[in-house]
Image: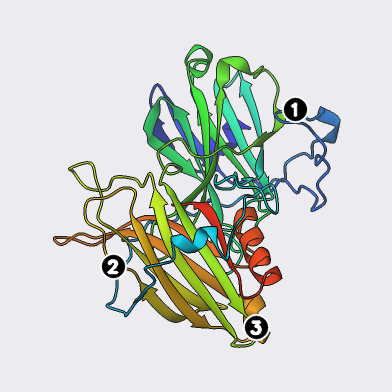
Amino acid sequence: MMGQIKKRGLDVKSFLEGKMVVLSLAIGLAEQDDFANLPDLQEVPPSQETPPDKSRNMGNKPANSPKGQPPDADGHSSVSDLANSLTGDMVMLSPGSEDDDHEGPVSEKLGRIQFSLGYSFQDTTLTVKILKGQDLPAKDFSGTSDPFVKIYLLPDRKHKLETKVKRKNLNPHWNETFLFEGFPYEKVRERTLYLQVLDYDRFSRNDPIGEVSIPLNKVELGQLKTFWKDLKPCSDGSGSRGDLLVSLCYNPTANTITVNIIKARNLKAMDIGGTSDPYVKVWLMHKDKRVEKKKTVTIKRCLNPVFNESFPFDVPAHVLRETTIIITVMDKDRLSRNDVIGKIYLSWKSGPGEVKHWKDMLSRPRTNVAQWHALKA
């Protein structure tokens, strides 16, 4: 096979001691998931694997775009007594119970990824196949994601490979094969396979979804084996952006949703001095269109700001299912573009914590329903 690959004139990239060849193989896995009940990192018996097809196409590499633009100057209304209402008509909800007082954000399930690993001693080639993802979280306000996978052999982070982007798909099938050719087995065992799943964003930074790390000295590489692995929060700092306490109030008579931005805690420091100047933008979205934007005041040099600001939005009942509220915590910068600290997408089809908050709002009309949310990249 390696001889055939070279004859077809594929580009060979220099990779450390060896060479790296990237192929995309359509291995023809069935749409039905035959491995749904397998436990974490369980090997798939060889008899269940589908042999690869001969056709192939090179993976596209998505490009990053500049950060978002500075906020516009919109009006905002202050609610000075909102903090006191937490003990009055506001309902504090936690992810696990309808009425308990736990204030922690929801621990979101990030889905899982299926991949194959194997090493050919004859060809000194490591094979990594990225097969598919399952139950990935929605990162876009449309209720879906555009996932792709980055592949590293740690500790080297300078060289990476990427799969194609699968548009609007929470259960993507990549079926792409990556060959690390001319890589001595002794060197392979010193490496850690690192897979990072991201949501491609055309207009801003790509959003991390989750990651998998596999020390290759812990895996029997003599034969190609297939594994499932649960995605974990990314350890590059993207998961530690702080939390935001938000309350929602739905008034079916007035056809309004009132968003109360109460306070934040443990925000990520974005400035050189180890602090941030946070403010919050609130966008009302209908389908994929921006309808209205509001924003809070800026709190100077504070990682635990208290805002207590309320924003009513007109939302007719017949568009509720197509409505998304995007809340973005920003760091104000006078000399350059403002930085995004983190985001929240509230709708009936967002992540588990966001959906719960949305449903609780609808089930308790005319009541301020408050919940903590972990900010996401």
Q: Kindly tell me whether residue 315 is visible in this rendering.
A: yes
The one nearer the camera, 189 or 324, is 324
Label 1 residue SS: loop
Judged by depth in the image, the label closer to the viewer, 2 or 1, is 2
Image spot of residue 78 (x, y percent): 35, 73
First in sequence, mark 2 or 1: give its number: 1
What is the quadrant of the N terminus in the image?
Answer: top right
Q: CA distance from mark 3 to mark 1?
A: 49 Å
Which residue is labeled 1 in the image? 42
Q: CA distance from mark 2 to mark 3?
A: 29 Å
| Label number found at residue 24 | none
Residue type marked 1: Gln
Q: Residue furthest top?
A: 186
State the image quarter where residue 280 is shown. bottom left
Which residue is labeled 3 in the image? 252
The residue that appears at 64% across and 50% down in the rendered structure is 95
State the image quarter where residue 115 is shown. top right
Which residue is labeled 2 in the image? 297
State the image quarter where residue 89 is shown. bottom right
Residues packed near mark 3 inside 10 Å, few (<14), some (14 to 19) or many (20 plus):
some
The one nearer the camera, 109 or 299, is 299
Image spot of residue 279 (x, y percent): 31, 62
Horizontal arrangement in the rendering, residue 76 relative to residue 110 (left or right) = left
Horizontal arrangement in the rendering, residue 27 relative to residue 308 (left or right) = right
First in sequence, mark 3 or 1: give its number: 1
* Cβ–Cβ under 8 Å for marks 2 and 1: no
Residue type marked 3: Pro
Relative to 189, say whether 105 is above or below: below
Relative to 316, say whether 139 is above or below: above
First in sequence, mark 2 or 3: give its number: 3
